[in-house]
Amino acid sequence: MRFSRDNIIISNRCGEYLNAHKYFGFFGYEQDFEVSLWFINTLDINRYGAPCGFSSGENAKYFLLSAINTSRDKLESVIISEDGSEVEIGQKYVKREDYESFRNFISRAEMVSVFDVPNDIYDYNVYLLYLANYGSQDDIGAQFSGYKYQGFDNQINIKYNY
């Protein structure tokens, strides 16, 4: 690609933005939620501009609230147990520290959602919730930027009857 995106907040870079939006299922709505795609201009008339980022614009807060609801639903679907010994078969459970950590991510996003902040801050919090849910293992930008989240999805256990 041969150009830097260091001046673009990580959540608005192409791969990171798309990863978060795909994870939360923000595609295929009946409504037309517009997003902006940014391009790097080139001085060479034989080359097109390269995509460098997205933003949700006026829809950013809606996406954040949706990501919060998805995350909250997931948190409410598990119980806390250190080893699953007292859990019914088929029940999802997580350790207390993983539950609390994920709850804190959700709480921070909820705090942001009540303020009137720039839309990129809402986008950023959608991205942080994506990392909190899924983890950073498949997100090259997150790894490069130093994010090391295992992801709540990877902490959920299900008790089976063997």
Image (spheres, helix red, strand yellow):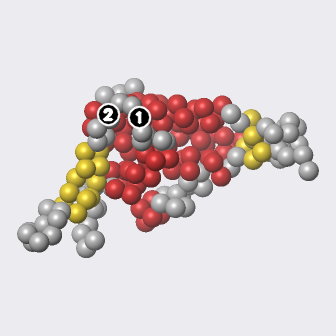
**Is 101 on the left-hand or right-hand side of 141?**
right
- Asked if marks 2 and 1 touch (Cβ < 8 Å), the reply is yes
Is any part of residue 119 visible from this angle?
A: no
Residue 75 position within the rendered picture, expressed as x and y whole percent measured from the top left: 63, 35
Residue 101 position within the rendered picture, expressed as x and y whole percent measured from the top left: 61, 43
Res. 32 mark:
2
SS at circle 2: loop
Q: CA distance from mark 2 to mark 1?
A: 7 Å
Residue 109 position within the rendered picture, expressed as x and y whole percent measured from the top left: 46, 36
**Is 96 on the left-hand or right-hand side of 139?**
right
SS at circle 1: loop
Residues packed near mark 1 inside 10 Å, few (<14), some (14 to 19) or many (20 plus): few
Q: What amino acid is labelled 2 in the image?
A: Asp
Res. 29 mark:
1
117 or 153: nearer the viewer: 153
Q: Residue at x 32, y 34 (%)?
A: 32
